[in-house]
Amino acid sequence: MVSHEREFRSYTKDLASSERYVTFLHDITEESGLDITPQTLRSDEDIETFASRLSGRFAAKSIDNYRSVMRKYVAMVQDRAL
C-alpha cells in the first residue's frame, strides 16, 4: 500500500515521469513486503531499509531508480509535514 498516493501524484504532476513514479512506488511495496507511509519512509535511512529489501531482486541500476523515487516521496513527506 502507498499512503498519500493522491498527494504524491499531485506533488510530482509537473514531472514527465510522474505516473512512472507511482508505478515504481507500487513495485517497491510489492517486492519489499513493506507499506509506504510517512512513518515507514521519511528519511535516508528508511530509503536504505527499503533498498536493502530489494537487493538481489533487481539490478543495481533499477534499485538506484527506486531510490530516486523514494527520495521524492521523502521530500513530499517533509514538505507537506505528513
Image (cartoon, grey):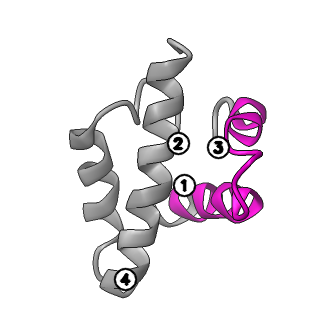
Q: Is residue 17 magenta?
A: yes
Give how far across and how far down residue 31 sits, in percent. Answer: 50, 67
| Dot 2 or dot 4, earlier in sequence | 2
Helix, strand or loop at label 1? It is helix
| Residue to which mark 3 is pinned | 1
| Residue to which mark 1 is pinned | 29
Q: Is residue 24 left or right of residue 10?
A: left
| Residue to which mark 4 is pinned | 61
Q: Which residues are magenta?
A: 5-29
Specify the amino acid type for callout 1.
Thr
Specify the amino acid type for callout 4.
Lys
Which of the two residues, 28 or 7, is positioned nearer the viewer here? 7
| Dot 3 or dot 2, earlier in sequence | 3
Q: Is residue 11 magenta?
A: yes
Q: CA distance from mark 1 to mark 3?
A: 6 Å
Q: Comparing marks 4 and 1, which lies closer to the viewer?
A: 4
| Dot 2 or dot 1, earlier in sequence | 1
| Residue to which mark 2 is pinned | 35
Q: Count neighbours of disc 4 (C-alpha within 10 A) and say few if under 14, some if 14 to 19, many if 20 or more.
A: few
Q: CA distance from mark 3 to mark 2?
A: 5 Å
Q: Measured along the vertical axis of the image, is residue 37 above or below residue 59?
A: above
| Dot 4 or dot 1, earlier in sequence | 1
| Dot 1 or dot 3, earlier in sequence | 3
| Dot 3 or dot 4, earlier in sequence | 3
Q: CA distance from mark 4 to mark 1?
A: 18 Å
Q: Quadrant of residue 6?
A: top right
Q: Count neighbours of disc 3 (C-alpha within 10 A) and say few if under 14, some if 14 to 19, many if 20 or more.
A: some
Magenta span: chief secondary structure: helix
